[in-house]
Image (tube, grey):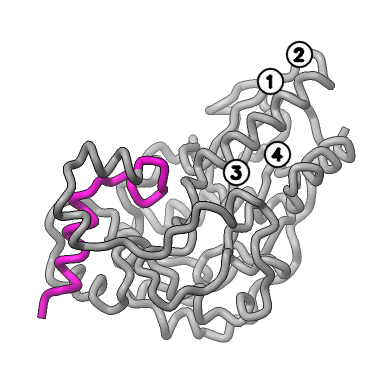
Amino acid sequence: MKEVLRDFCNSMQIENVGIAAIGPYLELKKILKERIGKGQFTEFEEKELNKRIDPTVTMKNVQSIIVCLFPYYSGEESRANIAKYTYALDYHKIIRDKLTTIGNFLAEQLPEFQYEAFVDNGPLVDRYLAYLAGLGFYGLNSHIVTDKYGSYVAIGYMLTNYPFKADKPLLRTCMQCGQCIKACPGEIILGNFGIDPRGCKSYLTQKKGELTTAEIDIIKKTSLIFGCDRCQDVCPHNSQIVLSNIREFQENIIHELCYEELVSISNKEFIRRYGNRAFSWRGRKLLVRNFEYLKEE
């Protein structure tokens, strides 16, 4: 069945699919407890530690986890003011639709098959699952890196009640050149394959409310109003990558948002125009706020 799964995924242009064991992930628990103790977390993370390290808390009868990578790189654009992962239509929907298709296919092949699919909305640490499934290796910036697509990959996973044989992690890391550490606007890459997300520009561009002077200064270090690609832009592992092989990430491309447009339209009109984009989830006002931070002297 594992080969059947891989063949079906390949027919959908999903080249990177693997199986993660179901834990519990005691090594990860130790890492997370240390980071939490240092305050190195944000409100976007699952609060209950056991949910993050034990898949059975989410799905009692889980026996394996299917993990898929979705490369999204569509090329460089010097005028871009949003992160690369937001150029195409919302990756959450693209990936969720593909995972549902995989789930429906497996349900046709396997009696009593059950699954729960997640794209950024699950309690588990998706990059850790991708690592366990042998789909990539860790970079110093905590991203998962692949040889073909670099670190420009989104992750989706499915808890299933079928005992697919687990894959093994790759016994390697990035080349540890330190370029990402030097380039990070918030200086939050710690050098031990972890980060302090509180100063991450990508996080700060999505953080609600008025920011501190120090946080605003971080946002002002690069021209993006949503997200941040600096650690990926300078990474040598991203220098020879190919474009995404997935059609949806090559279509309906937007590289740049316009301040004058955003301030002149209503929230309802914003949703009508951009509600199917990943950068829209925090709303129009947040994007306007970020624009105005960049305009400050």
> Residues at badges 2 and 1 in contact (C-beta under 8 Å)?
yes
Rendered location of residue 172, percent (x, y): 72, 70
Say which amino acid is labelled 4. Ile
Left/right of residue 109 with respect to residue 120 in the rendered view: right
Q: Nearer the viewer, mark 2 or mark 3?
A: 3
**Image point 69% across, 37% down: which residue?**
65
Residue identifier under label 4? 66
Give how far apart the Cα atoms at labels 2 and 4 are: 17 Å
Q: Counting residues from the N terminus, which is met first, the one under dot 3 or under dot 4?
A: 4
Q: Counting residues from the N terminus, which is met first, the one under dot 2 or under dot 3?
A: 2
Q: Is residue 294 magenta?
A: yes
> Residues at badges 3 and 4 in contact (C-beta under 8 Å)?
no
Rendered location of residue 2, percent (x, y): 86, 38
Say which amino acid is labelled 3. Gly
Residue 27 appears in the figure: no
Rendered location of residue 135, percent (x, y): 71, 56
Say which amino acid is labelled 2. Glu
Question: Looking at the rendering, in which quadrant would you find the C terminus?
Answer: bottom left
**Element at badge 4?**
strand
Left/right of residue 214 with respect to residue 46 in the rendered view: left
Q: Is residue 157 magenta?
A: no
The numbered dot on residue 112 is 2
Image mark count:
4
Residue identifier under label 3? 156
Which is the main secondary structure of the residues drawn in magenta? helix
Give how far apart the Cα atoms at labels 3 and 4 are: 8 Å
